[in-house]
Image: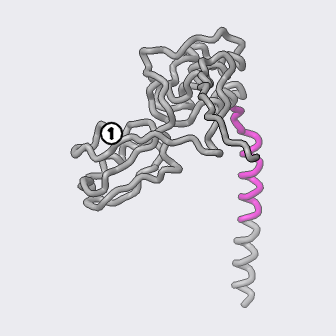
């Protein structure tokens, strides 16, 4: 019985010593991130689509912070994000670079499940794991996770993936930026009969 208690005591003491050592090492060797990169990354849409020419939003944010990339290379972020980045960095606003794409309304992928052959190529291409399914089984999109990056479309051999526009809801609707072209339709009102 004493041997068991002794073994438990040694293991507990070893755990405490190693825990303290790891705690010290985590504070001693902590790597500080660049706060500017974190702010830029928080503005970017996190689609991880690569349209900006970088493999994801974080590498693009790092390139912007180092002045190696322009602020107008993100089509999913659009005009609104370019304005936010220009304001944050104190740079002049530039319109979206046509070389990197055009701004589109928010979209999500939709798989036609009748046509899907379960090849898993779309699952491998999705940077945010928004596609679920198994080999030789039907796949589907988790719409809440889909960023609309369109990276799943090219690898699909049967072309069963399409993009659908997400309608604005109370959760997704935003005010338009001042200065954007807005048209408020003026509609004639039919005269109503007044009660006598």
* Depicted 129 relative to depicted 135: above or below: above
Q: Quadrant of residue 29?
A: top right
Q: Give residue 94's position: percent from left, percent from top.
A: 58, 11
Q: Give residue 10's position: percent from left, percent from top.
A: 73, 72
Residue at 60 percent across and 13 percent down: it is 67
Q: Nearer the viewer, residue 23 or 104?
A: 104
Q: Tell which residue pokes out farthest to the front in this image.
A: 196
* Depicted 36 relative to depicted 18: above or below: above
Q: Is residue 140 left or right of residue 21?
A: left
**Majority secondary structure in the magenta region:** helix
Q: Give residue 85's position: percent from left, percent from top.
A: 65, 20
Magenta segment, which residues? 15-33
Q: Nearer the viewer, residue 173 or 195?
A: 195
Residue at 72 percent across and 65 percent down: it is 14
Q: Is residue 20 magenta?
A: yes
Q: Nearer the viewer, residue 117 or 29?
A: 117
Q: Is residue 169 magenta?
A: no
Q: Give residue 99's position: percent from left, percent from top.
A: 42, 15
Residue at 26 percent across and 52 percent down: it is 119
Q: Is residue 77 left or right of residue 191?
A: left
Q: Quadrant of residue 180?
A: top right
Per the image, label 1 sits on a secondary structure element best described as loop
Q: Callout 1: few (<14), some (14-19), or many (20+) C-alpha neighbours within 10 Å?
A: many
Q: Is residue 146 left or right of residue 13?
A: left
Q: Tell which residue pokes out farthest to the top in this image.
A: 92
Q: Is residue 94 left or right of residue 99?
A: right
Q: Nearer the viewer, residue 111 or 157?
A: 111
Q: Which residue is mark 1?
A: 153
Instruction: Tell me the quadrant of the picture where the N terminus can be found.
Output: bottom right
């Amino acid at each position: 019985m004493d041997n068991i208690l002794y073994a438990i005591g040694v293991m507990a003491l070893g755990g405490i010593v190693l825990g303290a050592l790891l705690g010290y090492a985590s504070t001693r060797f902590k790597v500080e991130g660049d706060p500017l990169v974190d702010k830029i990354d928080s503005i970017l849409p996190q689609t991880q689509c690569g349209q900006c020419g970088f493999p994801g939003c974080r590498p693009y944010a790092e390139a912007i912070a180092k002045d190696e990339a322009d602020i107008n290379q993100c089509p999913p972020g659009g005009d609104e994000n370019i304005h936010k980045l220009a304001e944050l960095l104190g740079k002049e606003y530039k319109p979206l670079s046509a070389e990197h794409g055009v701004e589109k309304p928010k979209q999500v992928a939709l798989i036609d499940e009748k046509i899907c052959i379960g090849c898993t190529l779309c699952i491998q291409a999705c940077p945010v794991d928004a596609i679920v399914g198994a080999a030789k089984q039907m796949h589907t999109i988790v719409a809440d996770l889909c960023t609309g990056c369109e990276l799943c479309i090219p690898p699909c051999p049967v072309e069963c993936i399409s993009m659908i526009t997400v309608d604005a809801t109370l959760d997704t609707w935003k005010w338009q930026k001042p200065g954007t072209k807005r048209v408020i339709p003026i509609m004639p009102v039919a005269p109503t009969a007044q009660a006598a």
